[in-house]
Amino acid sequence: MWRALGILESDGPMRVGELATACRVTQPGMTRALGQLVEEEFVSRIADTADSRAWLIRITPKGTATLHAYRAEIGTALEPFFRDLDDADWRALERATELMAARTAVEKEAAS
């Protein structure tokens, strides 16, 4: 659920199959998960303007707020483990994050 919401927040609306691929789950599995996300009003379906036969899934304001609250909760839980890092350690973590983001973007572009 959190991965799907995060992907929709960062990448914008997408078709069920695209979201399933991005989440690395089967399309039927994603369809089942989306049922719960729609019921909770975390996502909604919108018409695909490029293909009138298809629907896109988008994150709702409630989904965005819930995702941000979850991330804040995780941040609070992890904070004690990182509290004593010095500037060099933070720079190392920032660089590692940049590398992961760059590699993920390359993988995403190659899959498109």
Image (cartoon, rainbow, N blue to C red):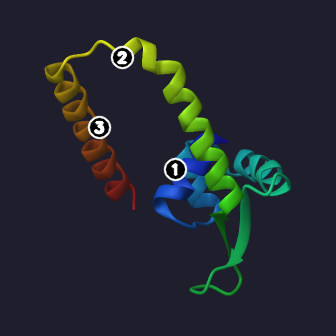
Q: Which residue is mark 2?
A: 82
Q: Which residue is mark 1?
A: 22
Of marks 1 and 2, the one in the foreground: 2
What's the residue type where badge 1 is placed?
Answer: Ala
**What is the quadrant of the C terminus in the image?**
bottom left
| Residue at 44 percent of width and 20 percent of height | 79
Which of discs 3 and 1 lies nearer the camera? The answer is 3
83 and 67: which is toward the camera: 83
Indicate the position of residue 30 as horizontal and vertical percent values: 70, 49
Return the residue at label 3: 100
Q: Identify the mark nearer the N-term, 1 or 2.
A: 1
Which residue does the image show at 16% across and 23% down from the upper left?
Answer: 87
Lower sequence index among marks 3 and 1: 1
Please name whichever residue, 12 or 107, is drawn nearer the observer in this view of the structure: 12
User: Left or right: where does residue 77 sit relative to residue 85?
Assistant: right
Q: In the structure shown, which secondary structural element does the residue marked by tag 1 occupy?
A: helix
